[in-house]
Amino acid sequence: MFKTDDGKNYFFTFVIVSTLFLLWGTCNGMIDVMDKHFQDYLHLSKAQSAWVQFAHYLGYLLMSLPASWLARKVGYKGGIIAGLLLVSLGGFWFIPASQISAFWAFLLGVCLIAMGLTVLETVANPYTTVLGPKKYAATRINFAQSFNGVGWILGPIIGGAFFYSTEGAAVAQGQLYIPYMIVAIIVLVMAIVFYFAHMPDLNTEDEYHLSDITPAGQKRSLWSHPHFTGAVAAQFLYVAAQAGIFSFFINYIIEELPSISQPLADGWFFKGRAMLRDGNYFVNERGATFLLGTVGFPLFLIGRATGAVLMRKFKAHRVLGLYSVVNVVMCGLVVLRLGWLSVAAVLLSVLCMSIMCPTIFTLGISGLGVQAKKASGYIVMAIIGGAIMPKLMGYLGDTYNMSVGFLMPMGCFVFIALYGYSWPRLSHTDDFVPLSAKND
């Protein structure tokens, strides 16, 4: 999986690059439990609290193309170091932001960290695809993204510990900067490690001859390849669906989860994480956060790991299409408000979402050669979908209920399924078997 045609093995390089996926998974997981804190502290509506997600994904929009340019100019290693320094700056900003104690100050910190993560994602995603044979590209990126899944587990646990307090939202507000200060220090250490690490600048074969000069004296455009443009659209909608589901997971559990029994409320899982209302016990914010961190994100991690294994035998675009169809069904079950069955459907949707981002990325940059760095910037920029679409989901939740809000991700998964199953025609090839011979 990690040995190139010249016999060099890049396993160690792959391992240290994978730590970046752990970093941004943790930061993203913390963001996803911050919305409810500001709803409580600043008395915001669901749609208003979505500004947290907007600021996060605005960072991706602002930095994606500069990050692509940076990767082409200073290489993968220089890009990673620059991204880490920017994340550290954003983390330290939360210290004065806590003193300012204004919503805009925290949104600025969120945006700065996201800008640093944008650089890391623009560089690390395509880099994992070139650290070995092409046929293992989808498996390598999904394995690396498994570390991202570990971060998604840690993020809500860390966020739940600091963003919520039994003493009220005001007390929690005073300690919100602590996890970000710790992240800033860790990231500085990581930048030093990468500075001394050996990281060759590798590229895949330019199968579409994008670097060739046409008779008109110009290079071929990335946008003339529908498998790339389709990936940009699919990534926009995937991140929209993911951000919406994760951002409003806590709201969904609190509003839609049926009451639980007193023994369950007093048990180890929900002890201190349930509230008594109208004579019945319901899961509170801490319980919903704990459920996301201990059940939802572990399923996300399991999905990444098992998805990587599946793509050793089946074509990546077919796995993507199948998982998307399953998620269309899961969102439909949520909209129908079927009690615990709908709750299970939400959790299963998290598992099926797991392989989508890295797989769309791999399919989108396939065969683009050195232009993959430029293409990576556009695909990462598509993450802005997470800033726009959750506001629609929040609006549906405010107007109707959070179950109806799942119509938004449902529509997104329909398009992703179409992209997955149409990929061979879009790429003008049917031989991209990310990990196996043509035997499925």
Image (cartoon, rainbow, N blue to C red):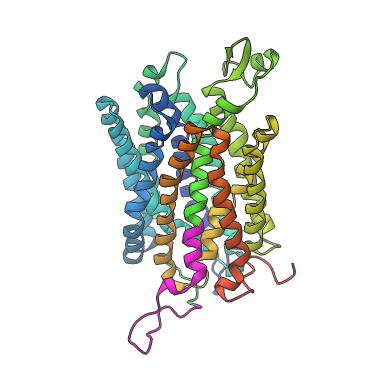
User: For residue 404, what is the image quadrant?
Assistant: top right
Q: Classify residue 93 as left or right of residue 178.
A: left
Image vertical order of residue 227 relative to residue 345, above or below: below
- Considering every residue shown, the one lying at the far front of the view is 399
Q: Is residue 215 magenta?
A: yes
Provide the residue span drawn in magenta.
207-234
Q: Is residue 394 visible?
A: yes
User: Image point 66% across, 62% down: which residue?
Assistant: 318
- Could you say where residue 286 lies in the image, as x and y percent from the top left? 53, 23
Q: Is residue 65 left or right of residue 24?
A: left
Q: Where is residue 388? Give x, y as percent.
A: 41, 46
> Which residue occupies the extreme bottom position in the image?
215
Residue at (52%, 51%) from the top-left corner? 238
Of 361 and 343, the residue lying toward us: 343
Does any portion of residue 143 appear in the rendered image?
no
Please tell me whether residue 330 belongs to the stretch shown in magenta. Answer: no
The residue sitting at 55% across, 70% down in the picture is 4
